Image: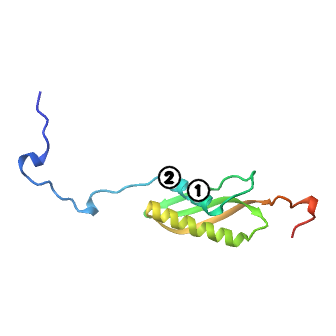
Amino acid sequence: MRPVSAGAGELGRPLPVVPPGERGATRIADRVVAKIASQAAREAVGKLAEDADRPYADVVVAHDTARVRVHLELDYPTDIGARCAAVRRHVAERVGALVGMEVPEVAVHVERLHPAPGQGAAHGRTR
């Protein structure tokens, strides 16, 4: 049986220094980026109607960029444009900060609108 060596330092030689660009790379899976984007969309949307589905995201990652598509449901009446802009901004910031990728595009798809409690047939038509 051979004794276990402690490595190159045991012989008095310094360990070689590898430049950062040659050390390798960390690859983050698309589904991980999608989960982060989904969570960021939930944070940005805030409280939703009881029967609303949680926001979810689809992501395509190429090199150091992520293109995100968020699907969500909103309450009605609301300023849909402002809420979608807030989701876009928050998702891009969080994905960029947590994953370190550039997010040039966040597409927001509003799947469904939920009338606020008290709206509907009992109170007439809402415009």
Which residue is under mark 1?
Answer: 38
The crowd level at tag 2 (other Cα within 10 Å; few <14, some 14-19, many 20+) is: few
Q: Position of residue 56 (x, y in %)?
A: 62, 55
Q: Amino acid at mark 2?
A: Val
Between 59 and 4, the one nearer to me in the picture: 4
Going by the picture, which residue comes out furthest to the left? Answer: 12
| Residue type, numbered disc 1 | Ser
How packed is label 1: few (under 14 Cα within 10 Å), some, or many (20 or more)? many
Which residue is at a point 9% across and 45% down the rendered structure image? 10
Q: Secondary structure at mark 1?
A: helix
- Mark 2 secondary-structure assignment: helix
Query: Residue lying furthest top in this view?
Result: 1
x, y (%) of residue 62?
A: 46, 62
Residue at image coords 51%, 56%: 33
Image coordinates for residue 116, horizontal then vertical, percent? 80, 60
The quarter holding residue 34 reads bottom right
Q: Would residue 119 appear left or right of 81 to someone viewing this image?
A: right
Say if 82 sits above or below 28 in the image: below
Left or right: 66 as drawn, with respect to 24: right
The earlier-in-sequence mark between 1 and 2 is: 2
Q: Considering depth in this image, is 48 or 127 the residue closer to the camera?
A: 48
Which residue does the numbered mark 2 point to in the structure image? 32
Specify the quadrant of the image occupied by residue 89.
bottom right
Q: Quadrant of residue 105?
A: bottom right
Residue sitting at x 73%, y 53%: 52
Where, quadrant-wise, is the N terminus in this rendering? top left
